[in-house]
Image (tube, helix red, strand yellow):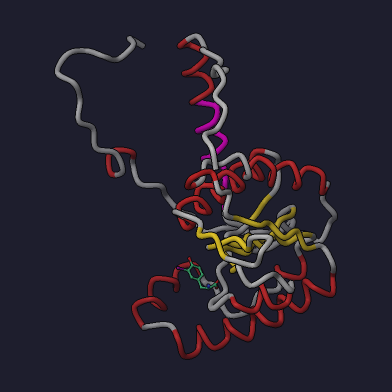
Amino acid sequence: MGPHRFQPLEFARLPVDDMRERAGRFLDTMRTRRSVRAFSSEPIPLDVVRRCIEAACQAPSGAHKQPWTFALVTSPELKRRIRLAAEEEERRTYGERMSDEWREALAPLGTTWQKPFLETAPALIVMLRRDWEILPDGRRRKNYYVQESCGIALGFLIAALHHAGLATLTHTPSPMGFLARILERPPNEKAFMLLPVGYPAADAEVPVLERRPLADSLVEYAATTETETAP
Ligand code: IYR
């Protein structure tokens, strides 16, 4: 493959006050995002969901290979099959496969093997990772940094859904092999994350959680001369 064609970057340079306001507003938006496990069955505008998926697809990816597929599932029959298969795996995970340490770490959340939200939520997004592509001649072409690329795109998706007024949950039934099987995906696609999407149930509750103070998550290595724009 030859080099890409290059063109001048279009970059909107903002006044610093606007930058501060936007950063603050985005932070406020993200502060209100919660993982939701009780969904209303009320329909949602699917065009909004598709736009959020398109926003996720704007993520950077290793060698620009875009190594993902998003399956948008609204069929009640498929949702039911996914729920039953997820619950079968989760029943064994919670019953036999989890270590005591893992069970203890999860206990405060009160989650169980039961996943009714997989049927109640009006939509499920199954994000699949593509570790390789199938070339037209049948050979395999490897993708790079697939985990990182999918993680970034997933982050974009969660932020986009929340920003658009939809609730979601990053659900990882384990193992997840049943998803690619039920959805009859090609052999190069493996489930990466399962996200129910919808409005929260009217009586949805979430645990009272605190985010660590920034100082526990950020270490700074400052320049000795002032490089920061004054507030
Ligand atoms: N996949 C299981 C268990 C689970 C694990 C972690 I780590 C969580 O933060 C939450 C749940 C489930 O979805 O119930």
Location of residue 159 in the rendering, given as x and y in whole percent from the top left corner: 59, 43
Q: Residue at x 43, y 82 (%)?
A: 98
Q: Quadrant of the N terminus?
A: top right
Q: Quadrant of the C terminus?
A: top left
Above or below — where is 91 with respect to 188? below
Above or below — where is 145 with respect to 57? below
Q: Is residue 30 magenta?
A: yes
Characterize the magenta stretch by its predominant secondary structure: helix
Quadrant assignment, res 92? bottom right
| 203 left or right, relative to 58 | right
Magenta residues span 24-34
Quadrant assignment, res 10? top right
Location of residue 139 in the rendering, given as x and y in whole percent from the top left corner: 59, 66
| 144 left or right, relative to 86 | left
Q: Residue at x 74, y 52 (%)?
A: 199
| 160 left or right, relative to 102 | right
Above or below — where is 211 with respect to 181? above
| Figure label count | 0
* Nearer to us in this view, 152 or 158: 152
Quadrant assignment, res 191? bottom right
| 56 left or right, relative to 63 | right
* Nearer to us in this view, 22 or 200: 22
* Nearer to us in this view, 46 or 59: 59
Location of residue 54 in the rendering, given as x and y in whole percent from the top left corner: 69, 42
Q: Is residue 140 magenta?
A: no
- Name the residue at the left extreme: 224
Above or below — where is 5 with respect to 211? above
Q: Residue at x 45, y 11 (%)?
A: 16
